[in-house]
Amino acid sequence: MGSSSSSRNKIPNAQELMDQTGFSSAHLLRLYDRFECLDRDNKGYLSPDDFEAVGGLAMNPIGGRIIDAFFSSGQDTVDFSSFVWILAHFRPTDRNRNKEGTQQELPDSRTRKLKFAFQLYDLDRDGKISREELLQVLRAMLGLQVTEEQLQSIAERAIQEVDLDKDDAISFDEFKKSLEKVDIDTKMSIGFLK
Amino acid sequence: MLPLGLMLLLLPAAAADLPGTGSPPLRGPGLGFSPPVPASPSAPPLLLPQPGAEYGAPGVALARSAAEEPTGTGEEEDPGEHDHHHGGGYRVVQWEWSYVQTPYIIAIWLLVASVAKILFHFSQRFTTVVPESCMLILLGLVLGGVVLIANKKQLYQLEPSLFFLFLLPTIVGDAGYFMPARLFFDNLGAILTYAVVGTLWNAFCTGFSLYTAKLLGFIDEHVQAEMLDFLLFGALISAVDPVAVLAVFEEVHVNETLFIIVFGESLVNDAVTVVLYKVYISFVEVGAENVQTADYFKGVASFLIVSIGGTMVGLIFAVILGFITRFTKKVRIIEPLLVFLMVYLAYLTAELFSLSAILSMTFCGIGANKYVEANISQKSRTTVKYTMKTLASIAETIIFIFLGISAVDKSKWAWDTGLVSCTLVFIFIFRAVGVVGQTWVLNRFRLVPLEKIDQVVMSYGGLRGAVAFALVVLLDGEQVKAKDYFVATTIVVVFFTVMFQGLTIKPLVKWLKVPRATNRKPTINEEIHERAFDHILTAVEDIAGLQGYHHWRDKWEQFDKNYLSKLLLRKSVYRKSELWEAYQKINIRDAISVIDQGGNVLTSARLSLPSMASRASFPEVTNVTNYLRENGSGVCLDLQVIDNIPGAKVEEDMETHHVLAGNLYKPRRRYQSHYSRHFMPLGEQERQDREVFQRNMRSRMETFKSTRYKRHKKERSLKKRRGSDVKEDGSDKPRRNVSWQDKDPVVVPVETEDKAEHSDPEKDEDVGITFIARKAETPKQRPKSVPAALEGCQIPLLPPPPPAPPSPPPASSSPTSEDSHLPWKGSLGSPPPCVSLEATKIIPVDLQQAWNQSISSLESISSPPAPAEPVHPRVSALSRLGGPRPASYTPPGSAAGSTFSIGPQVSQGSFLFPDKKKEEEEEEEDMEGGVAAEMQPLMSSLKPPGPLPPPPPPPSSAPGSGRRRTPCVYLRSLVTSPPPEPHSRGPTQL
């Protein structure tokens, strides 16, 4: 613990972050290393360019969206705590913690996970996935394999399936509902080192 | 053994000499189970060191007994030989038993197994409580008892060679080929751990503990066994058996993670068991004293080689299989055969090199599935699926029956209470301990830890089965002195685990509230989002600098996409997107479920089916009849009358019927159960589906309402769409002109409906179709559905006369038909009047429509004035739409869209049907929704997403009128829909 706590001192607000996100200090350290690694110029924050330098992301059809998700609207930098905060969405849900949790909802909760995914679709952040937004994501994921008509019929069906209030868009509630049978815990979690 | 294989090939000939000779050719009645695989049994199974010696006698006995079985006599002598040699001179009728003996026996056995299965499923309540495997074993016990009493000695035995060469491969092949690959690999770590570590743990602990028990005197002294013997026994008894596990767990429906772990473990651990077994056997043969240290390492190496080698062989064959099926476009008919051959060859080849055949076959199946399924035609897929399931099911049945039978023969085993009870206790304890221990470790790495309940079920689900039995029977009695005791113990263990644990695991699962499988098909949303999740996780892993599971999976997918798929997939298939495929599947599934659920009758559904769009014009009405008759669906509308009137249609109908029977009916199962071989009883899962459907329907309905008013827009969109498709122009216009509103005004007395109803039943009786369901429905349905159907038909008619072929009574039909149809509309206008007491029952929308159609057809017949016309117009209209178009032209998008739309509605309707009255009201709503929904899909396919944002439901759509009218629109849309997109053909073929 000694060595880790000493290096932990480098990390701003370490304790607070750990409390908020549920990451252990080992996680945090590791993430901090990664953060510094991404932060090539030692700016202390990350810019979209830093993310784009990550190898796999370039290949990822919705990589751009994910990068965007790290930057709250209007900002083009992300500091370490936001970085960790966002990654915390992908922790496996910690049941014990949430039960105790009188505090605010942890980012790894189901709702927060879904919210994160939802925001990837919701480009204009109006709280709804419009048909056009859905189409864009589909287009990105399917690439050239599918004709525009096919894309549209898929999107059409997807929206119809869940569109409860008939506004031809998917609200977050509808989104959540459409995935209520899906094991989000498994499908939106990453095995950070425990 | 070699002769054995060859003999198989020469069955008939061999059979003739059999009774006389003591050779082992006639291995058993079940030999014939590997039908698709006449090839290369020449590979001597290494697993079966000395079946000849041990089982030579039984084999012969078997043959003889087999001879007697069918005749039902207890004669000791072989009747065939007898008769044969006694005859003098020319005989008109000869007794050629010896000639047909083998295939005859095989057939009889298959028959027995099938009948047994049928009988078991007669009582729904019984089968839900008692697992099939238990019943089969009981049946085996009874059969064995009967034969034993009759013959004084046991004639049938589960022959190891039969088991390993034919029965086991069919089961493993089925399991491997239909293994949910994603799930399997997601849990690969856990599966491997349990299979390898767990099995080793069980084997050693059981072996040592038994030895200790022996030393302590718990086990009788008659059991002459040394340390090695016990270890050997421990190895063979520790293997969880895939057959038993599959048989039981499939019926229990635990959640898929649990299932895949237990089942995957049972598949993989066979490799471990068999290797251990072989190592011990060789040690025993050499003698414990002579075993060198190096031998232990050789044992370990052997394990690695056997399992990895087996996997590699399987994967190699998977690649070959995928590659071959790439080129079968012109010879579709051999596709299924290829699949069976290659999978079985993978098994045999692995056996040939004494690698793990089970692993080989499993991985061949898993690996090839994706590519093969994409390459081969829909029919081939269906064939493969059905054949595999049939074979596996029969093999399983026979295994369990044999287990029962072999237990009866006392000469084969010797009882020792100490050994039996110790074994039972030990395997149970060590299984539990092993599971808990491993889970504890695994949970440190697992994303979603395995709960305590899961562990209980996993421990309890450690069923032993035929593999253990076959292995123990294979033991050499000379070298393993305690063999008979081991056999008895194994039998008891198998019986106990399969019977007792199998019986109690269901209540246990219920009691523990283990999360069950939902058996739910993914919605398109889930498909989309889950795909997105995968990407998200991969990206996040990249960002976080973790090289986790998703990272590698993504790498693999890239590799697969860039190389493997290019190599193994047809070009045409390679272009397709998985998501699009999924979309198509969902659509088709909806349509199929419609048909399945009694929606058979729904014309529109069939119309919309993409696969049919090009071929089948309207003849569906008649088809339905055929279809229903064939499938014995409960809800039958006999429209046969129609057949006679428009004679021209018959041929077409037949064709459509075949298409339907071939494409629609069978595939249904495919989607129904992912890895289940058995029929799934309607359960709660279905309910959930229903709910989903209802919700969708309702929403679609709403959208429809709103969109209805936006018709112009839609049409515009349609035009756009059609821009690509020149042929469609004609259809568009009629649509526009005809608004449902025009037709509405016509008032039809309710009486007509009744008439129709009455007439209907009578006609139905001829065919022996059940009428009940329909009746109940009729009152409510008509109002809505009838108009819809009529309109749909009519609308197409209005446009220019059909240029081309099959429409029988084309031009004349339109006006008259309208009249006939109109009455229905009138009924619509008058809302609840038609609802009789019967109406209280819920009527599925699909049924309603079907009913309406049938009614209209009947009406035409029954009521002189408007006889055939109503039908004809429709038909002609449809035929125009469908028929005239060039065959090549398949409306992809539209077809899909329409299908799906119909599907949901129908299925929804059908789902509701069984429900009680209380739901009625809801149903009504749903029905509304359903209709709208139906429309919706069409519209969706037709309309471009952007331009047509359906505004909130317009006021006019409000209560009665809106609802009633929608159906018409819906139908119309259906009729018109076929022409949509250019590409649809390929995708639809799913």
Image (cartoon, coloured by chain):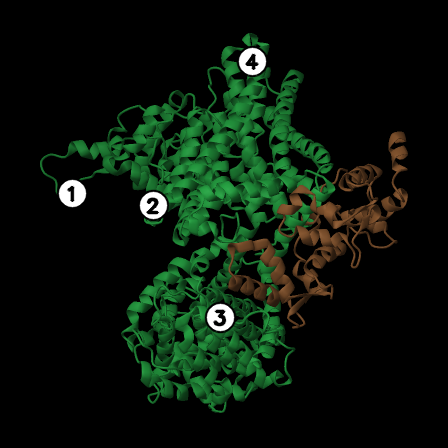
Chain colours: A brown, B green
Of callouts 2 and 1, which one flags the residue occurring earlier in the amino acid sequence? 1
What is the C-alpha distance between the residues marked 2 and 3? 39 Å
What is the C-alpha distance between the residues marked 4 and 3? 73 Å
Of callouts 1 and 3, which one flags the residue occurring earlier in the amino acid sequence? 1
Residue lying furthest front in this view?
A41
Left or right of residue B561: residue B402: left
Kind of residue at badge 2:
Ile
Circle 1 chain: B
Residue B20 image point, x, y percent: 26, 26
Q: Which residue is disc 2 drawn over?
A: B334
Kind of residue at badge 1:
Val
Q: Which residue is disc 1 drawn over?
A: B93
Q: Secondary structure at mark 3?
A: helix
Of callouts 2 and 3, which one flags the residue occurring earlier in the amino acid sequence? 2
Mark whose residue sits in front, 2 or 3: 3
Of callouts 2 and 4, which one flags the residue occurring earlier in the amino acid sequence? 4
Mark whose residue sits in front, 2 or 1: 2
What is the C-alpha distance between the residues marked 1 and 4? 64 Å
